Image (tube, coloured by chain):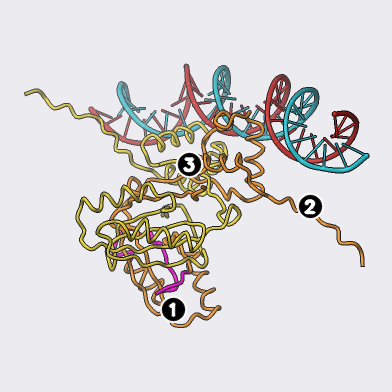
Chain colours: A yellow, B orange, C red, D cyan
DNA sequence: TTGTTAATTTTAATTAAATTAGGAAATAAG
DNA sequence: CTTATTTCCTAATTTAATTAAAATTAACAA
């Protein structure tokens, strides 16, 4: 039995500079390295290398454009609260697989409480939502029920994680 | 009474190329103009100018980095369902103003149904959530009640608007 | 059809940012 | 204190963004 060589695992910890960079990029991913560097009192190279590290190590998942729904086309947002009759693991996996494929399901969470899943659904109008709920959700096996909350107004809709 | 000069309002309509560009940038805002151009069979200048137009006219709100919550620090996500005792307009505005300031409230929607507001809250742990719900929500005037659904698992969490 | 205008795209040139390389300063470890 | 390690800086290079000018296409009226 040989000596177990301790691999260098690299703790992948964040320091204050990393967190500051993440805070900036969460607000505006187009901020150029030079500008971030100036805000932090550094030059762009360390900033650049930290960003690359943060991407490499998975602290930054990806960069996306946030669109203005209202200007693009008619749509409504609905939260669907789904209850299962019996939570069999296999059933849930089927449900997830379907949900992943439905483009109108923008978010899906397993939750604890009065119901089992919470979906955020974006569709063209009420009619489209009715069809979605009836044929794409309620019709799935082992679904107990679906309640809906229609979004009347968006007060706040951030994408960022609240870094202290 | 003078003749009413019809201002050129610029219909700000999206064609298929615009939509294709938006679809790409929603998925990956770092896609370079050249690559988008190749996918669409164009050169980079028209792509560049369309993107600038889409930004200018507000179809693109902003660009953000999406972080990996789990790697950064301990946190839980909770949906809070808030009911008002009486929906007075002024009360609601106060509520919104507070909510806008709370960094732990990541999303806030006015909804129709069994309750009045739906919040997505990100906090460090259950204890922090208890304090948030008790002191920052339930204590506000005219709040009827707060129910909570704790996120056990994220199945899907997209930021994009489902463009047909 | 044909000429005119406006809009869009292309090519080419310029500017700015990202990326890489090598060495200096600060920090931590022995 | 000395060495090793990490982090940072300066400067050079590559790549992408941005601008400019000419060419093409589309729309439309004569």
* Side of B47 where B121 appears, left or right: left
- Mark 3 or 1: in front is 3
The image quadrant where one finds the C terminus of chain A is bottom left
Q: Earlier in the sequence, mark 1 or mark 2?
A: 2
Q: Are marks 3 and 1 on the same chain?
A: yes
Real-space Cα separation, disc 1 to disc 2, in angstroms: 45 Å
Range drawn in magenta: B111-129
Q: Which mark is residue B8?
A: 2
Q: Which mark is residue B27?
A: 3
Say which element carries label 3.
Answer: helix
Say which element carries label 1.
Answer: strand
Q: State yes or no: residue B110 in magenta.
A: no
The image quadrant where one finds the N terminus of chain A is top left
Q: Chain of mark 1?
A: B
For disc 1, the marked residue is: B84
**Viewer-nearest residue: B120 or B111:** B111
Circle 2 packing at 10 Å, graded few (<14), some (14-19), many (20+), is: few
Q: Chain of mark 2?
A: B
Real-space Cα separation, disc 3 to disc 2, in angstroms: 33 Å
Q: Are marks 1 and 2 on the same chain?
A: yes
Real-space Cα separation, disc 3 to disc 1, in angstroms: 38 Å
- Mark 1 or 2: in front is 2
Circle 1 packing at 10 Å, graded few (<14), some (14-19), many (20+), is: some
The residue under the point 17% across, 26% down is A5
Residue A41, x across and y down, in percent: 53, 40
Q: Which mark is residue B17?
A: none
Q: Is residue A41 visible?
A: no
Q: Earlier in the sequence, mark 3 or mark 1?
A: 3
Residue A84, x across and y down, in percent: 26, 62
The residue under the point 62% across, 29% down is B42
């Amino acid at each position: 039995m040989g000596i177990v060589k301790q691999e260098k695992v690299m703790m992948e910890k964040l320091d204050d500079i990393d967190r500051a960079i993440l805070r900036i990029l969460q607000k505006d991913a187009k901020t150029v390295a030079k500008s971030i560097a100036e805000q932090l009192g550094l030059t762009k190279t360390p900033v650049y290398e930290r960003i690359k590290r943060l991407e490499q190590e998975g602290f930054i998942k990806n960069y996306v454009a946030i669109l203005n729904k209202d200007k693009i086309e008619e749509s409504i947002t609905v939260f669907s609260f789904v209850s299962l009759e019996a939570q069999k693991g296999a059933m849930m996996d089927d449900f997830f697989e379907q949900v992943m494929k439905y483009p109108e399901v923008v978010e899906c969470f397993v939750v604890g409480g009065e119901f089992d899943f919470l979906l955020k659904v974006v569709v063209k109008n009420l009619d489209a939502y009715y069809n979605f709920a009836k044929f794409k959700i309620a019709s799935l096996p082992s679904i107990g029920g679906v309640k809906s909350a229609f979004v009347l107004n968006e007060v706040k809709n951030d994408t960022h994680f609240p870094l202290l």
